[in-house]
Image (cartoon, rainbow, N blue to C red):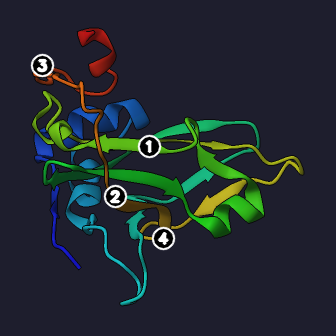
Amino acid sequence: MERIAVFEKVSFEQFRKDWKKFSETAGEEEVRAIYDAISLPKRATAGSAGYDFRAPCALSVPAGKEKLIPTGIRAKIDSGYVLILFPRSSLGFKYRFQLDNTAGIIDSDYYHADNEGHIMCKMINDSREGKTVEIKAGDGMVQGLFLPFGITEDDHVSTERTGGFGSTDKQQ
């Protein structure tokens, strides 16, 4: 297997800024404790394709509700590869807990974005039975796969990313 990426934590300053989107009431000490407890994504077994992203804190998401969850993680990815995030199967089967955009695409140049490439997951509980999703701090929440990609023969894009989430759409 080819080694093509490295996971890192974003800076505490970036995490604190983004955490306000999740919880406006969290104090400095609470945010620091959450940040310090964040672990880098890992594969569960030698045969696992996906890297498990863990919940940075306990989460409770009622049916029909969504949450934007800062992971505290960024990925330095070699050119020619992409990180794709998917919901964990068990949460999807039990609750229909999923990424709001179905799959998250993390481009290699996102690492250099103005938000330090902070990977955030907007999750929705689409339960049809009214179930509330309860996830403990440190439990798996989404999984990421690194995949190679190709481009067309007539592709001559040379524009570089300047912003964070959603910025590539503005550069066309």
Mark sitting on residue 139: 4
Label 3 sits on residue: 159
Label 2 sits on residue: 147
Closer to the camera in the image, 67 or 5: 5
Lower sequence index among marks 4 and 1:
1
Q: Residues within 10 Å of mark 1 (few under 14, many from 20)?
A: some
Tell me, yes or no, whether the two marked residues, 4 and 1, touch with CB atoms within 8 Å: no
Q: Residues within 10 Å of mark 2 (few under 14, many from 20)?
A: few
Residue type at the position of mark 2: Leu
Closer to the camera in the image, 25 or 172: 172
Residue located 25% across and 59% down the image: 33
Q: Nearer the viewer, mark 1 or mark 2?
A: 2
Label 1 sits on residue: 104
Residue type at the position of mark 3: Thr
Q: Nearer the viewer, mark 2 or mark 4?
A: 2
Residue located 23% across and 80% down the image: 1
Q: Nearer the viewer, mark 3 or mark 1?
A: 3
Q: What kind of element bears circle 3?
A: loop
Residue type at the position of mark 4: Asp
Q: Give x and y (percent) for residue 129.
A: 89, 51
Q: Residues within 10 Å of mark 3 (few under 14, many from 20)?
A: few
Q: Is residue 19 visible?
A: yes
Q: Which image quarter is the C terminus in?
A: top left
Q: CA distance from mark 2 to mark 4?
A: 24 Å
Lower sequence index among marks 2 and 4:
4
